[in-house]
Amino acid sequence: MDLRKNKKRDALLTFIAIAAMLTVLLVMELTMKSTSILFTVLKKGMIYALVAVSMNLLNGFTGLFSLGQAGFMLIGAYTYAILSMPTSVKLGDTVYKYYDCAINLELGIFPSLLLAGLFAAVFAALIGFPVLRLKSDYLAIATLGFAEILRAVFQWDKMGPVTNGANVLRQYKDLTKLRIPFTDIKFPPTLFCFLVAGLCIAIIVLLINSSYGRAFKAIRDDEIAAEAMGINLFKHKEMSFVISSFFAGVSGALLAMYQYTVQAAQFKTAMTYEILLIVVIGGIGSVTGSCIASFLFIACNEWWLRFLDESSNNILGLNILRSGFRKVVFSVIIMIIVLFFSKGIMGEREFSWNWLHKRKKTAATEEVSGDG
Amino acid sequence: MSEPILSIKDLKVNYGGIEAVKGISFDVEEGSIVTLIGANGAGKSSTLRTIAGLVKPAAGSIVFRGDDITGYDTNVIVRKGITLVPEGRRIFPDLTVQENLRVGAYLRSDDISGDFQWVYDLFPRLKERTWQAGGTLSGGEQQMLAVARALMSKPKLIMMDEPSLGLAPLVVRGIFDIIREINAQGVTVLLIEQNANMALKVADYAYVLETGRIGLSGTGKELLTNDDVKKAYLGS
């Protein structure tokens, strides 16, 4: 009984917290300058949170060590950019300078986002057949390989009429082109990122807590036992792989919206490693961990450590600050985190209201005993 | 005699390039406890893994309740009512006791609350530990969880691979009491054991496996008093 009551209370608290967060975000966007670095961090942080959670679904919850995330983001970003680009731009000379664009189709933002995810998912389903028979490191190498092949193919000359070769894609429907439906009023871009990515993360969380999620975790814990319980290993691995890739595709599309331009060269292995870093720092097998780590990572990378790159700021008269120094400090921070939080910030735990409640209670009792 | 619930004919299994099981035949009567005993490498585990569909047989047939299930996938076999308790317990360490049990009932779409009640009545120790992670249980409790998890699929035949492995004698006795209890409630049991003494005491019928072939067979009591069995497996 008590448990059920708590569940109801937790759902209500979560709902209130999310509503409050979105309201604060909306007010901030309406009152603050839109070029503020805070919004950059929030937008990029949320997009990375989505891809990190999708990677965590595979690595943390299904136990599949896959490193193909950048590849699926690439598919998502390109699909979105190409499909949402106005036909007039495609026919013109500003983007497709050296090729005649072969796709004469223009879709809205939501269909393009959805198709971005679907294309990534279809590709994942296809490579899943050979790749998912591999285990651990071999799976990582194979998925990494496919992601690299994909990048090469998208940059290939012969693919020019579709992907514009190695040249950038732009003038598609990016975040600045968002409008509130049926009006000409701008839709707050950060709020849009939070709504779309938040919805996707919520779907992943529901999946993890469903019976499918339990099967994924069983496979992660012990494949043989899971199979003996009647869980079809390949089917469930493929499902997890496809779903994870779908959301990686959507986050790729969101990244394209955020960036205004898309180029295949950006989606290197280094990008997958950044995401892996977020997953590891946050805690493998923790959704909230991935989200927290994502915002911290992006904030450090883009904002808080920026001052280290400016050579005009001297410390004690020493001229050690110069461009690139930020990365040195950043690496040291990461090493410290890995040394002292070897399971990441959250480990395998999730944020829960119960935990907060208990902490408040112990703090209160400590205060009381302190007074006496 | 009534039709056996499980009937194995000339089963051959190749495992890692060698012929682990070289053509064995045996029957399991409905409602009985049948045990396969034998030394390491006699092919006991391979036999069970093949019946469960984890390994595909090279030849022979497996008939369960009149259906030929030879070479079927594990999920089909579990649905038909055969569940394996794998060797070495293999519970899911990061899932809670309750989640472990839910995974056991993964293929079922009907109401499982009654079955939770059933296994918690069989294993009151697990009920106290519902929210504990499986990996934090003691060895004996993990074995209970492994059996309980298999029971959640509501099997007609439960196969146990070395349930006494690595457990203290007192705990082993507890496990065998549970096996009797489960059997008394109508579940047929196929048991593999190296602890031949205990296994023969609970078994209605027993087969002795020697390097992939069936040597002796008889009721548990007969084999317990058999001189060859005594010498080879009972150490007296």
Image (cartoon, coloured by chain):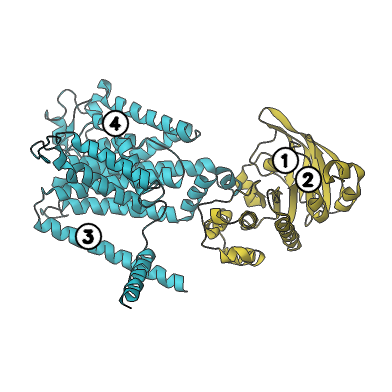
Chain colours: A cyan, B yellow
Q: Which mark is residue A268?
A: 4
Observer-side mark, 2 or 3, equals: 2
Q: Is residue A215 visible?
A: yes
| Circles 1 and 2 on the same chain | yes
Amino acid type, callout 4 = Lys
Query: Given contact means CB atoms under 8 Å apart, are the residues at marks 4 and 1 in contact?
Result: no
| Circles 4 and 3 on the same chain | yes
Q: Quadrant of residue B12?
A: top right
Residue at mark 4 to residue at mark 1: CA–CA distance:
49 Å
Q: Chain of mark 3?
A: A
Q: Is residue B199 left or right of residue B158?
A: right
Q: Which mark is residue B36?
A: 2
Q: Is residue B115 visible?
A: no
State the residue position of label 3. Answer: A22
The residue lying toward the viewer, choosing from A251 and A269, is: A269
Q: Quadrant of the C terminus of chain A?
A: bottom left
State the residue position of label 1. Answer: B47
Q: Chain of mark 2?
A: B
Q: Chain of mark 1?
A: B
The residue lying toward the viewer, choosing from B142 and A367, is: A367
Residue at mark 1 to residue at mark 2: CA–CA distance:
10 Å
- Seen in the picture, residue B14 relative to A188 is either above or below; the reply is above
